[in-house]
Amino acid sequence: MFSCWNRRPKPAVMSKAKTQQPAVIHKVIMVGSGGVGKSALTLQFMYDEFVEDYEPTKADSYRKKVVLDGEEVQIDILDTAGQEDYAAIRDNYFRSGEGFLCVFSITEQESFQATAEFREQILRVKNDDNIPFLLVGNKCDLEDKRQVTIDEAQTRAQQWAVPYVETSAKTRANVDKVFYDLMREIRSRKMEAIRQSNGKKIRKKESKKRKCTIL
Amino acid sequence: MEEDKPLIPGVTVRAATPERLVHLCVESFGKDGRLVEDNEFPSVLFLMHKWFMTSDEMAEAYVDLYQSCSDTVACMKPGCNHRPSSIDCQIQIYKAKICYAVRFWISNFPVHFDLDHRLSTVVKRFANLVQCEGNLTLKQLIDLSKVPSYDWMRNMSVRNPSMRHNRKVSLVFNHLEPMELAEHLTYLEYKAFRRINFTDFKNYAVTASLKDNPKLERSIALFNGLSQWIQCMVLSKTTPQQRADVIVKFVNVAKKLRILQNFNTLMSVVGGLTHSALARLAKTNACIPSETQKTLMEFTELLSSNNNFSNYRKVFNQCCHFKIPILGVHLKDLILLHTALPDKVEGSLVNFRKMAQLSQTLKELTKLQNHDNIPVCANMDLVNTLRLSLDLHYTEDEIYELSLAREPRNSLSSPSTPTKPVVFADWLAGVSPPVPNTINKHVHDMVEAVFKNYDHDKDGFISHEEFESIAGNFPFIDSFCVLDADKDGMISKAEMKTYFIRANCHALRKCFKHDFHEITYFKPTFCIHCTGLLWGLIKQGWKCKDCGINAHKHCKDLVVMECRSKQHAACNRRQDSVTNGTPTQELTYSSKRKMSQRQKRNRVHQGTQTEEIYFMDYQMRNSHMNGDGEYYEEQGQLYDRLLKAEEARDKLMAENARLEAKLEASNDQIVTLKSHVGMIRKNTITFILEQMDALHIQRDTEV
């Protein structure tokens, strides 16, 4: 279906050797029904050109160093392909995710309906309504077979207060965008969490100070 | 197209036409019929050919090659007539190699020939062709007579008669040893796993859908069923301690599964135990011993998806002999490979490099399916009971609701703003429930198994007590009186079968569905969900017609409480139908599976023994009725009440035990007294007889 991919392992390995300190890791989970193109998106993002020796079993097959707004970070992608039907363990996978790409195929209404169920389960597992989350309509190159209208998808995205992006793993349209957008959201959530915990500390310090002055 | 660094020894071709591949395969064999330098090319080709062509097409390619030998190779021997009798004829040598290749195919992949009639037809034709040429030695190489039958693979569930060991085991969960449970789960798992064939794997990798893939679907359904059964078994218990005990038991089962190297079932068990529906039960988790928690953590670590399942992959590769892989992980590898690499390159050349890569996973999977010695011996009765336990299935939402009902959310952490209502989805994770016929068959087998083991007097009925012990395996099934449709105090086979078939159609969800209607209140009333006042003059809120709870319009969909009065309604209806003498069938349909039903029944049951508890129960029910829901407290209070009731029950049980001991002592006394009576009577009789004798003698002498 997709001609070929090329790995870029060399620079990653070299930078690993150079900078010992591990970069920040953003954990992304690809969810959606079977056959919507989760794996194709993942692979398009991980590798660009020609790959002969793709090894799906290697430990770092789904980890990549990227530069996000000038900062070097690592992305770790958990692709749930092949395990969509193992409903019982999906829950456990979701727990480790920091951000979710919820993918459906614009050529398949059923896959769009299923996103609601995935969203429900993710919110329940993460117990957080603001979890970084993107609704992704894949296969947008197949416009003539479209079953899910842009309006329909956008209405749902608005209801959930999440961004909606249409992608094509085939033409590579918006592939980088969805991953980078999600990473930005994850990053800002992490910053917020740090600020909050710092804020608490500062407030504590302040209260201590105040006590001191009173005393 | 060749390459310098082969992935698998001997597999140097990167892409080629099918004809070229067949030729290369033939060239891998020596004159003596052995593989040249352990060349693995033929095994990869025969294993993978179905990815890009059908088996009969492939066989035809060999036939074509045989018939047009002279175009492929040239015989340089002067004056050679290229007959089978000629020695050192290159053409004859090549023909022999073709036959060696086909023999290799038959002996290494016999399953292809048994399951594919078109293939065996082509091969038989080939054998005739060789024979017609007068090449009898070569004809003998192509021999299909030794291909064993793979009938069991065609069928979804044919039983292997050699496995009918009759080890005596208990069918009751509470009495089952972890090892027994682990072994029987492994038996079920392996049976489902080994039926999945190459085409099933391929179709799933290509379509990513379970449509028309019943064998893989069955395996996945088993996986999900087990995981959910575990959650239900835990959630069916009323106190945190009891729930913790069940969890501990399943962790022990997990340990045994690890020893058996059954990673798929292990994943399912650990997945069930660490599911958020159980992980959120803080009170229960506090009761789990730290050692068990540690073990569970270790298993979670082992099966974690981190670093592309690296922990699991490492351990799995180290395991030898019998093992069952986590199918999902390997399916994912296949899908990713298929997505990353094209089937055809440069127009129509088969991308054999891809085939070689795929073959590494598929070879492992097919090798594991052909273990003839599974290290477990199964008791078919237990297998049947378990299989049905795992067939009863719930949705994720239903189980989560149940979890919330057991240990309600902390009121502080619950979202104050109305979030999306929790709807009971009809969407069922792709895996459709087993078809009715399968269910009926499983029910039949299970009921037969239960009666074989529990109907000791073989009269076709089992009693109340016997039923209670089996019911533990099926969380949330109805009480004895519902099953006992004709109210004769015994359950017949037919009653039990009807019940289970119906139970499969029914869902637990009914217990949580309220029948809300807008209503006007005449006194201040509070919402059951947010505990806030129902504001307004008219139509302030919504009331459930069945159980009478009240809620705001925006809260009513968030209520996570069972519709409890439905039980009473069911009870009442039951009595009605008995008095009216209406067919009891209808009643079974109206009643629902309820988690608290059995426990409730217990309470009533004990109530008849002691006045006090009966009174309490009566009072509780009264408060339900009178209050008509207006006095319904918060869930937390209800929960406390439940705990108190359970405490009282436990106390009563202790009392009961004490009284029983007393009774026994009294019985002993009676026995001793009886023996005394006997002695006294004996003495009295001898005394009377003596007296009479004496009188007789007296009279005689007087006379």
Image: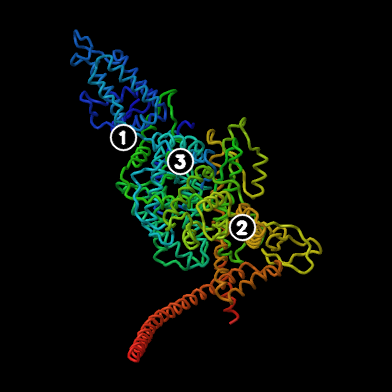
Residue B8 numbered tag: 1
Which amino acid type is marked by label 3? Answer: Leu
Which amino acid type is marked by label 1? Answer: Ile
- Residue B274 on image: x %, y %: 47, 57
- The tag earlier along the polypeptide, 3 or 1, is 1
Q: Secondary structure at mark 3?
A: helix
Which of the two marks, 3 or 1, is nearer to us in this view? 3
> Mark 3 highlights which residue?
B216
Q: Secondary structure at mark 2?
A: helix
- Mark 3 vs mark 1, CA separation in Å: 28 Å
B376 relative position to A7: left or right = left
Q: Report crowding for label 3: few under 14, some 14 to 19, many 20 or more residues within 10 A (C-alpha).
A: many
Q: Secondary structure at mark 1?
A: loop
Which amino acid type is marked by label 2? Answer: Cys
Residue at 60% of width from left, 41% of height from top?
A: A112
Q: Is residue B415 visible?
A: no
Q: Quadrant of the C terminus of chain B?
A: bottom left
Q: Is residue B136 above or below residue A9?
A: above
Q: Report crowding for label 1: few under 14, some 14 to 19, many 20 or more residues within 10 A (C-alpha).
A: some
Q: Is residue B411 above or below residue B497?
A: below
> Mark 2 highlights which residue?
B511
- The tag earlier along the polypeptide, 2 or 3, is 3
Chain letter for mark 2, please.
B
Q: Is residue B658 visible?
A: yes
